[in-house]
Image (cartoon, coloured by chain):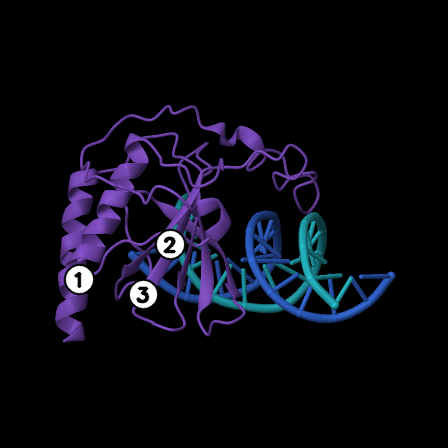
Chain colours: A purple, B cyan, C blue
Amino acid sequence: MENFQMIPSLLSSEMGHARLFAHFSGNNIITDDDHHEMKEEEPKFELHMGNSNNNFGDESGTSFGSERNSKKRSSTKEGKNKVKRHKFAFQTRSQVDVLDDGYRWRKYGQKTVKNSKFPRSYYKCTYQGCNVKKQIQRLCMDEGVVVTTYEGMHTHSIEKANENFDHILKRMQNSYTTAL
DNA sequence: CGTATTTGACCAGCGC
DNA sequence: GCGCTGGTCAAATACG
């Protein structure tokens, strides 16, 4: 329940980008990945290109990023105090795996996924103190479809939204012209 | 040289 | 308990 909530302003701007992607490729956002938690309210993302400012009290302070002792996080993994972070997924039909949503992401892992010939990539937002993560993976049934899963909420504004939007458009155009 | 990516290892959770 | 799988770390490497 606490998962997959509809995220306020800032995040919706991300989704706006995504929807653009999807729209351009003649597809719609679908969402859902984590079935159970997902259920209701099919997301109604809006295209907020501008920034909205953050502070939706990132509940994420939780466990990530803070101290990592020796190797792994110690008690971690939202384990004890099951604090679930906002998490939502959506699908887009796109040539590019990573949808540039205006934030800066650093890849920190990649895993092969069972039942899929495509690997899943793990990204973290590089903004200091922002512990948002996302996973990207392609559908094995339809390799044109990319599933992006966001986790957490950004504690900062989107970077260079407009310029970025321009990039998105260019990139989409490129990928399409090359694809054709 | 600073930053980002790659990639193998490590760890936890889950099912059997 | 054991093995499998997903998620993360961090050293090595690549790239600007």
Gap in Å between the C-alphas at discs 1 and 3?
11 Å
Chain to which the residue tagged by mark 1 belongs? A
Q: Report x, y in % for residue A56.
A: 38, 25
Chain to which the residue tagged by mark 2 belongs? A
Instruction: Residue lying at the far front in this picture: please name it.
Output: A40
Q: Is residue A128 above or below residue A108?
A: above
The residue at 33%/26% (across/down) is A54
Q: Is A172 situated left or right of C1 in this image? A: left
Crowding near pointer 3: few (<14 within 10 Å), some, many (20+)?
Answer: many
The residue at 48%/45% (across/down) is A37
Using the image as rendered, state which of residue A165 and residue A37 is in the foreground.
A37
Q: Secondary structure at mark 2?
A: strand
Q: Report x, y in % for residue A122.
A: 47, 54
Q: Is residue A125 above or below residue A154?
A: below
Disc number for residue A148: 2
Q: Is A32 situated left or right of A75 in this image? A: left
Chain to which the residue tagged by mark 3 belongs? A
Q: Which residue type does callout 1 highlight?
A: Gly
Gap in Å between the C-alphas at discs 3 and 2?
10 Å
From this viewpoint, is residue A107 visible? yes
Of the 4 image quadrants, the one containing the C terminus of chain A is: bottom left
Q: Which residue is mark 1?
A: A26
Q: Comparing marks 1 and 2, which lies closer to the viewer? A: 1
Q: Which residue is mark 3?
A: A145
Crowding near pointer 2: few (<14 within 10 Å), some, many (20+)?
Answer: many
Q: Are marks 1 and 3 on the same chain?
A: yes
Q: Which residue type does callout 2 highlight?
A: Thr
Q: Report x, y in % for residue A101.
A: 28, 46
Asked which quadrant contains residue A33, the reply is bottom left
Q: Which residue type does callout 3 highlight?
A: Val
From this viewpoint, is residue A124 visible? no
